Image: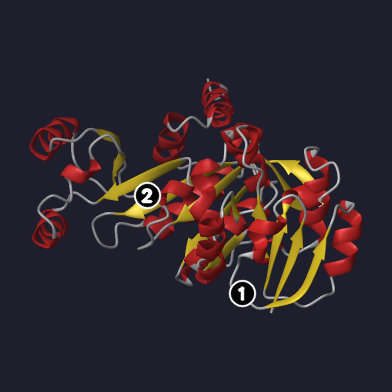
């Protein structure tokens, strides 16, 4: 059963053809609404935003987002320009308010097809993001989400995520997430979790205290939830031929993407030939990596090129050690 909280748009909400267990009208303090419904069971709440006192002050929406399960709330916005402003909508998403609309058709759609974070992630402006974690709002702008995806089969995305985490955590606060598999358990490493693909958005928000979140994307299509994605291609003849038999345009689709040759023994000239034949640009030629090598120079060079400049200190430190021998 459903709850309707109405004010300015009472007539519009009266036209909804849904079962209603409770309906209230008027304007209410955010705390008053939260306390009234936080322990009240309902399937959906259709909330007229004008029913919240001082609703233009987003602090009041924040209070509601803490007190109520916003996945069950459909927020009917005012039909004005401010409510359609991208920055305003971005702030709603940051409060984990994913279901909002300005009309009856939108309410009916969201009633039957509620949004998840993935559906509204494109609205979110990362530089303005503040989200709720343990009832506190914190900044997400310092978190960088890096996806890793195999293009040729078994190109090492899981092992690379593990090694990248081990190396990056020398200078950054890092966690790794694996989608729809449980291979991370074999590394016996903290801050590495396995989740279902539909939970990725919420986990990114929940773990915003990390500077870097590495995501082993596997077969998911969640690339758009990442700030950057590494596409792994193992350039062996058998792997490339298998890939082309499945989809002859598979490499062409990687144009303008961050392509990394994984477990590659190609020489620089061979890489140029590969780029010419595939008509794509290679971001990095990564050789087979030794996970027991603590320094792991090839991986460090790759991560520095990715923009993780704090690792440069490790290079300088290593140089000083070598020079100290003479």
Crowd band around label 1 with a 10 angstrom C-alpha radius: few (<14), some (14–19), many (20+): few
Q: Position of residue 240 (x, y in %)?
A: 14, 54
Q: Nearer the viewer, mark 1 or mark 2?
A: 1
Residue at image x 43%, y 47%? 224
Residue at image x 24%, y 43%? 254
Query: Can you tell which quarter of the image residue 47 is in?
Result: bottom right
In the displayed structure, does residue 35 sit left or right of residue 237? right
Is residue 294 visible in the rendered image? The answer is: no
In the displayed structure, does residue 98 sit left or right of residue 35? left
Is residue 306 visible in the rendered image? The answer is: yes
Residue at image x 54%, y 67%? 194
Mark sitting on residue 18 = 1
Q: Position of residue 31 (x, y in %)?
A: 90, 55
Query: Can you tell which quarter of the image residue 94 is in?
Result: top right
Is 212 in front, or is 126? 126
Q: Position of residue 250 (x, y in %)?
A: 17, 51
- Tell whether label 2 touches label 1 (CB within 8 Å): no
Q: Position of residue 88 (x, y in %)?
A: 64, 36
Mark 2 lies on residue: 289
From what the image shows, is residue 64 above or below residue 209? below
Is 74 in front, or is 50? 50
Is 267 in front, or is 141? 141
Q: How many marks?
A: 2
Is 75 in front, or is 19? 19
Q: Secondary structure at mark 2?
A: loop
| Quarter the N terminus occupies | bottom right
Crowd band around label 2 with a 10 angstrom C-alpha radius: few (<14), some (14–19), many (20+): some
From what the image shows, is residue 63 above or below residue 276? below
Q: Secondary structure at mark 1?
A: loop
User: How far is disc 1 from disc 2 in space, using C-alphas?
Assistant: 59 Å
Q: Earlier in the sequence, mark 1 or mark 2?
A: 1
Mark sitting on residue 218 = none
């Amino acid at each position: 059963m459903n709850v309707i909280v109405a004010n300015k748009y009472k007539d519009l909400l009266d036209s909804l053809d849904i079962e209603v267990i409770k309906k209230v009208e008027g304007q209410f303090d955010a705390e008053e609404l939260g306390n009234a419904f936080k322990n009240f069971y309902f399937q959906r709440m259709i909330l007229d935003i004008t029913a919240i006192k001082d609703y233009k002050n987003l602090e009041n929406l924040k209070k509601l987002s803490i007190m109520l399960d916003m996945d069950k709330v459909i927020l009917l916005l005012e039909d004005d320009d401010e409510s359609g402003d991208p920055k305003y909508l971005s702030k709603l998403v940051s409060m984990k308010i994913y279901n909002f609309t300005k009309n009856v058709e939108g309410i009916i759609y969201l009633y039957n097809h509620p949004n998840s974070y993935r559906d509204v992630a494109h609205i979110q402006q990362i530089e303005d993001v503040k989200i709720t974690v343990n009832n506190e709002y914190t900044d997400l702008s310092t978190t960088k989400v890096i996806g890793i995806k195999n293009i040729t089969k078994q190109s090492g995305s899981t092992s690379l995520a593990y090694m990248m985490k081990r190396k990056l955590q020398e200078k950054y606060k890092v966690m790794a997430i694996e989608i729809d598999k449980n291979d991370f358990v074999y590394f016996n490493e903290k801050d590495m979790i396995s989740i279902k693909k539909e939970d990725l958005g919420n986990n990114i928000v929940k773990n915003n205290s990390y500077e870097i979140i590495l995501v082993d994307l596997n077969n998911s299509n969640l690339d758009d939830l990442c700030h950057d994605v590494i596409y792994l291609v193992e350039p062996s003849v058998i792997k490339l031929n298998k890939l082309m038999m499945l989809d002859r345009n598979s490499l062409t689709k990687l144009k303008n993407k961050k392509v990394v040759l994984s477990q590659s023994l190609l020489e620089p000239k061979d890489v140029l030939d590969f780029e010419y034949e595939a008509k794509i640009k290679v971001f990095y030629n990564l050789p087979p990596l030794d996970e027991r090598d603590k320094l792991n120079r090839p991986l460090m060079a790759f991560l520095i090129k990715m923009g993780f400049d704090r690792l440069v200190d490790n290079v300088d430190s290593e140089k000083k050690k070598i020079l100290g021998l003479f």
